[in-house]
Image: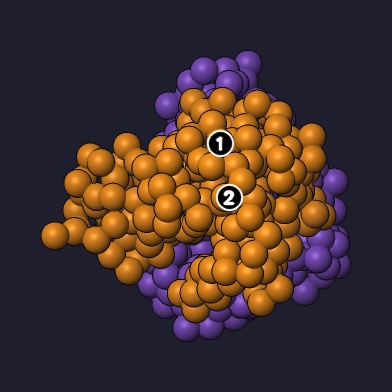
Chain colours: A orange, B purple
Amino acid sequence: MTTPITFYFDFSSPYGYLASERIEAIATRFGRQVDWRPILLSVVFKETGGTPLIKIPFKGEYSLRDFARSARFMNVPYTHPTHFPVSSKHAARTYYWLQEHHPAQAVAFLHATYRAYFSAGQDISNLDTVLDLAVAQGADRAALNEALAGQALKERLQVECATALQKGVFGSPFMFVDGEAFFGADRLPQIEHWLATGGF
Amino acid sequence: MTTPITFYFDFSSPYGYLASERIEAIATRFGRQVDWRPILLSVVFKETGGTPLIKIPFKGEYSLRDFARSARFMNVPYTHPTHFPVSSKHAARTYYWLQEHHPAQAVAFLHATYRAYFSAGQDISNLDTVLDLAVAQGADRAALNEALAGQALKERLQVECATALQKGVFGSPFMFVDGEAFFGADRLPQIEHWLATGGF
């Protein structure tokens, strides 16, 4: 019995998107599942003092170039969003709602939403856009819309962010393999090696 | 005629050390030289607002683990220094002095100094330690000691830091291949791919 790879991410994170396109193939190769955990970096940064990459002097300009180059290197389609970064709260809450009510749709929604934002030019901070993406996976628009307006889903996302912080998460993607923490899409080769060797 | 790979680094940077152990093999494979450029991150951070990794909440603890794990992944000997980070001004100035007067010793000194700090437990912020390391490569202790007390070497290092900042350098290692910027030891695979494909 193996434990899943826990994959913390923000739907507005370029490196989270890039890793999300590759982590399942790695997990599958080693008989693992992926436990997806969307969080809000805005909430995390309040606690850690972090700053969105592109707002950091010098590093911001480099990052814009590195997002696109890393995507080409990993062979993942990428078009930098016009609005960036954006609030991903509707997307994150929708993921947890789907996971609870229609688990088969949750992961499909996750990938569709990441691709909509980082490849198809859609603004995933927009509630209607998120509802459209969920409906396209089979979700009931009215039920989801009602849930998104309620308190329970907000609290669920708050708990996920608080739990992530307790585990030391400070960015996206942030992955755990058997308790070992890996930060960044560029740590996927180390994750593969960790799984292949049982830790190194 | 190909241009060298410019390799900006701080002698107190773990990822700079890891990359320094691998960049020459990559460069050689593609007929390139390495143009080593030690700088002081303390000077760079004054301009960029950067912070030493291990002083960043959450990220600091992770980094300590990642330094050692990345070293194992890259198969580079690594023992985290007792005193870290330290001032690397003597080491950086010594490198430029050797480069001017005894170029053949400069790169050997560079590797010896990095290994002394990150593998052999020596404190490279200590002037005598740096002098010993240079003398071991054949340098004249008295001449170097005098040069390190003078103004010219201080100014040389200041100019290197200022030039690095003008080129957008904000951390270590920071590498340029034909004008393309790569930050971090984890970008070595992208550098290899860049050299193999002529840019991607």
Residue A155 horizontal/vertical position (percent): 59, 72
What amino acid is labelled 1 in the image? Val
Quadrant in the rendering for residue B148? bottom right
Q: Quadrant of the C terminus of chain A?
A: bottom left
The correct choice, above or below, for B174 with respect to A50 in the image is: above
Q: Identify the element where label 2 is drawn.
A: helix
How many neighbours does mark 1 have within 10 angstroms: few (below 14), some (14-19), or many (20 or more)?
some
The residue lying at 53 percent from left, 24 percent from top is: B195
Q: Residue furthest left?
A: A1
* Residue identifier under label 2: A144
The residue lying at 48 percent from left, 35 percent from top is: A138
Mark 2 / mark 1, whichever is N-terminal: 1
Q: Foreground residue, B85 or A61?
A: A61
The correct choice, above or below, for A34 with respect to A136 in the image is: below
The correct choice, above or below, for A130 with respect to B28 in the image is: below
Label drawn at residue A135: 1
**Residue A137 shows up from this direction:** yes
User: Label 1 near label 2: C-beta < 8 Å?
Assistant: yes
Whole-Å distance between the Cαs marked 2 and 1?
9 Å
Quadrant in the rendering for residue A113? top right
Viewed as shown, does residue B193 lie left or right of B56? Answer: left
What amino acid is labelled 2 in the image? Leu
Q: Quadrant of the N terminus of chain A?
A: bottom left
Q: Residue furthest front?
A: A142
Q: Residue furthest bottom?
A: B82
Does label 1 lie on the same chain as label 2? Answer: yes
Q: Foreground residue, B9 or B70?
A: B70
Residue B189 horizontal/vertical position (percent): 46, 36
Chain on which label 2 sits: A
Q: Foreground residue, B124 or A195?
A: A195
**Residue B10 shows up from this direction:** no
